[in-house]
Structure formats: structure tokens, C-alpha cells
């Protein structure tokens, strides 16, 4: 235990010292974290005896995603968001369903061993994008503000939207549709997940903002404990919504947006510590991913799973995005940029853990596909983020 603690702490110490330099290169933090987990894990040098399992990875991914969604939403420029609302709206209303449909069609052709519902489940798991992996682009000021905010809102909401769709397919596979039929079940799940998520996020954020105002006025705030506020609120939104049967991810994102509106501009001072804590939790999550998951990919290479992962990150994502932005005042490169930077990560990991716990028949194949997609996304999006972001920003300024 102490050897593991020492090794992880030393790695975190070294990375924290050089993070600024790393972020300016083609190497991303998640790439290093995954590689470190693989090297020190049971498949590498076995320097760390990580007594971890898929459930622990899933819980870590949930908490990381909840905190990232909250802080990203809280840092959103609402004035810019109102001006560019067509962009995220098109990505969510048109692009997301098309992505699931195209993913379903490709899966039907490539995975004959999976049923139609299992393929639909796989397509849904790989539809949402990851706000944490996309942070390198969203935080890069070289990228036009409209693109950054559009991608941020999309990644903040699409995983929450996919939760009821995922649960619908799971229920149909398990034969829980009942006499009401799939449409009734789907609408009920959507209303429950979204409604409870919205309610939890709004109520808790409003209560927290009011409490902070009162305590600030009376001089009760502590400079040390105020750094915990955003983290505690993000986890409160997530945990409350999940406990009530709603989407904790929607609650986290909506809660962040509402919190920033109520406390603007003072909320920005509260975000810095939360973002650091989120980065630390994300580091542990990616180390676990590298240690627990990569061995199964390289141990028995699955050509179909690898090819589907490549398609998921390219054609299956980029074509629907391009079509959804048709007629919008954006250059061809901008549309391709938005399509490419739809990284898959924490949300897909959380979804596959849910499916593993449900013991769906084709879950082994699905887990392999999701793992390849996340790994290729960590590498592909990490390598291309800074270079393309700088190039796009420079060309946008010349126009």
C-alpha cells in the first residue's frame, strides 16, 4: 500500500511541476497518465499492486466527469453562449441522433455476434463526447470562442441525454418494456433522468449561492474552506440526482451554469481550486484505465473492434457533425475541427461499467470496442489538439 502511495505521489509531484511545459507540446496529460498506469501495472513492471476492479474505475470516472462538467459549465461565458446557441443546439438535436444511427449501421455490418439492441447499446455508449479530454481545445484561447463554447456545451449535455437512451436499450434487452411499449418507456426515462437532473442542479446551486451570499455578508467564510465549495457542490448535484433516479451528469452541468449566473463574476475565484482537484482525480482515473484495461486489448487483438473504434472517432462522428452544421456560418475547416474534437472518454467508461453490471450477453465485445475507442481518442486527440487549435486560430484571425 505504501509503495503504491509513494509511487503515485511522486508521479503526481513530478507532473505537477512540468504540467505547464507538457501542455504546450503534442503530449497530453491523459496520454502520460494512461502510459504510466500501463507501465507500473500488472502487465508492465508490476511495480504497483493495484487491487482495483472495473467498479472502482467506473466510480472514479463518474466523480471526475461530474466535477469537470460542473467547473466547465461554471466557467462558460453566458453572453457568448446566447450568441452561438445554434451551434450546440444543432450538435445535440441533429448531430447526436445521427451519430447513434450511423454507429448502429456500422455495428450491424461489423458485429454479427451482437443483436440489434446490443449494437444500439454500443452506438449509444460511444456517442457522448468527453469534456475532460476535450479540455485542451476548450481552454485553448487560439480557438474561436464560439467553437470552444459550442463544444463545451455539447460535451456537457450529450452524456446526460444519452443516459435515458442507454437505459431504454438495457431495459428492452432485459425485457422490461412491458405492455406500454418502448416509446412509453423511453419517454418516461427521458423525463425522469432530465427532469430530476435539472431540478437537483437548479435547487442545490440556488441554495449554495444564497448560502454563500449570506455567509460572505456576515464574514463567516474561511479562505481555506472556501476552496472546497465548488467541489462539494458539484458532488452534491451529482449524488442527489443519482440518488433520486435522475441524471447526475445533467445536474452537474446545469448546476454549474446556474451557479455561475447567480454569483457572476465572483464564481471565477472559486473555480481554480476545484479545477485542480478535478485534474488530480482525472489523473488517478486514467492511471487506473491504463493499468486495468490495456492488458486486455493487447493480449487478444480484435481487428473488428479496432476498426470500429477508428470509424467511431472519424466517419461516425465527423459526418453527422458536418451535416448538422450545414448552412451555418462556419468554414469547412471549422466544421471538420468540431467533428474531430469529439473525444470519447469518461462518459463511455461509465456507460460500459453500467452495461457490465447488467451482464448483457455481448458485453465482452462491447467492452473491447469501447476500450479501443477511448485509448485511440486519448492518443489521437491528445496529439492533434495544440497543433490544430493554433492553426485554426491563426487562420480565423486572417479571415
Image (cartoon, rainbow, N blue to C red):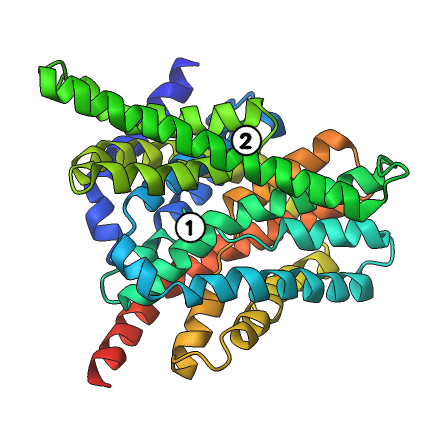
Element marked by disc 2: helix
Q: Quadrant of the N terminus?
A: top left
Reading the image, the residue beneath label 2 is 57
For the point 58% across and 32% down, the residue is 246
Element marked by disc 1: loop
For the point 67% across and 60% down, the residue is 100
- The circle drawn on residue 9 is none
Q: Is residue 266 left or right of residue 262?
A: left
Q: Separation of disc 2 and disc 1 at Cα? A: 16 Å
Q: Is residue 156 left or right of residue 125?
A: left
Using the rendered image of the protein, determine whether residue 80 is visible from the camera's viewpoint.
yes
Reading the image, the residue beneath label 1 is 133
Q: Are the two marked residues, 2 and 1, in contact with CB atoms closer than 8 angstroms?
A: no
Q: Nearer the viewer, residue 301 or 143?
A: 143
Using the rendered image of the protein, determine whether residue 61 is visible from the camera's viewpoint.
no
Please state the horizontal and vertical placement of residue 235, each as a whole percent of the image: 41, 26
Please state the horizontal and vertical placement of residue 225, each as a whole percent of the image: 20, 18
Q: Is residue 391 above or below residue 263?
A: below
Of the two numbered discs 2 and 1 on the same chain, state the one appearing first in sequence: 2
Q: Quadrant of the C terminus?
A: bottom left
Examine the image and state in which quarter residue 202 appears.
top left
Badge count: 2
Q: Is residue 210 left or right of residue 381?
A: left
Specify few, some or many for label 1: CA neighbours under 10 Å numbering under 14, 14-19, or 20 or more. many
Please state the horizontal and vertical placement of residue 134, each as a whole percent of the image: 40, 54
Please state the horizontal and vertical placement of residue 326, each as a whole percent of the image: 51, 80
Q: Nearer the viewer, residue 289 or 61?
A: 61
Farthest residue to the right: give it.
Answer: 179
Q: Is residue 182 above or below residue 63?
A: below
Specify few, some or many for label 2: CA neighbours under 10 Å numbering under 14, 14-19, or 20 or more. many
Q: Is residue 196 above or below residue 69?
A: above
Q: Is residue 314 above or below residue 371?
A: below
Amino acid at each position: 500500500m505504501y509503495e503504491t502511495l509513494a509511487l503515485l505521489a511522486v508521479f503526481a509531484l513530478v507532473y505537477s511541476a512540468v504540467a505547464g511545459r507538457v501542455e504546450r507540446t503534442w503530449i497530453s496529460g491523459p496520454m502520460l497518465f494512461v502510459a504510466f498506469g500501463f507501465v507500473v501495472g500488472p502487465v508492465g513492471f508490476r511495480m504497483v499492486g493495484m487491487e482495483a476492479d472495473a467498479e472502482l474505475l467506473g466510480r472514479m470516472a463518474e466523480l471526475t466527469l461530474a466535477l469537470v462538467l460542473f467547473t466547465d459549465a461554471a466557467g462558460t461565458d453566458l453572453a457568448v453562449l446566447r450568441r452561438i446557441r445554434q451551434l450546440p443546439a444543432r450538435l445535440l438535436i441533429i448531430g447526436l441522433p445521427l451519430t447513434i444511427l450511423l454507429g448502429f449501421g456500422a455495428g450491424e455490418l461489423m458485429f454479427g455476434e451482437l443483436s440489434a439492441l446490443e449494437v444500439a447499446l454500443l452506438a449509444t455508449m460511444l456517442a457522448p463526447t468527453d469534456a475532460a479530454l476535450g479540455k485542451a481545445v476548450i481552454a485553448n484561447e487560439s480557438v474561436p470562442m464560439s467553437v470552444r463554447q459550442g463544444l463545451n456545451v455539447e460535451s456537457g449535455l450529450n452524456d446526460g441525454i444519452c443516459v435515458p437512451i442507454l437505459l431504454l436499450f438495457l431495459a428492452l434487452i432485459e425485457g422490461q418494456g412491458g405492455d406500454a411499449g418502448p416509446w412509453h418507456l423511453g419517454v418516461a426515462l427521458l423525463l425522469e433522468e432530465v427532469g430530476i437532473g435539472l431540478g437537483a442542479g437548479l435547487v442545490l446551486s440556488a441554495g449554495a449561492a444564497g448560502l454563500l451570499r449570506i455567509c460572505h455578508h456576515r464574514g463567516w467564510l474561511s479562505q481555506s474552506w472556501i476552496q472546497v465549495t465548488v467541489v462539494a457542490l458539484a458532488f452534491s448535484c451529482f449524488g442527489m440526482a443519482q440518488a433520486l433516479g435522475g441524471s447526475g451528469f445533467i445536474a452537474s452541468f446545469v448546476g454549474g451554469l446556474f451557479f455561475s449566473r447567480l454569483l457572476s463574476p465572483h464564481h471565477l475565484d472559486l473555480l481554480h481550486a476545484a479545477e485542480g482537484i478535478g485534474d488530480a482525480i482525472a489523473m488517478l482515473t486514467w492511471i487506473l484505465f491504463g493499468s486495468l484495461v490495456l492488458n486486455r486489448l493487447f493480449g487478444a487483438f480484435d481487428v473488428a473492434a479496432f476498426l470500429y473504434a477508428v470509424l467511431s472517432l472519424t466517419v461516425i462522428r465527423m459526418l453527422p457533425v458536418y451535416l448538422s452544421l450545414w448552412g451555418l456560418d462556419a468554414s469547412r475547416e471549422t466544421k471538420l475541427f468540431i467533428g474531430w474534437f469529439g473525444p470519447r472518454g469518461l462518459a463511455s467508461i461509465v456507460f460500459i461499467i453500467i452495461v457490465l453490471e447488467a451482464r448483457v450477453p455481448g458485453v465482452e465485445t462491447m467492452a473491447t470496442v469501447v476500450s479501443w475507442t477511448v485509448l485511440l481518442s486519448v492518443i489521437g486527440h491528445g496529439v492533434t489538439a495544440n497543433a490544430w487549435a493554433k492553426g485554426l486560430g491563426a487562420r480565423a484571425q486572417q479571415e
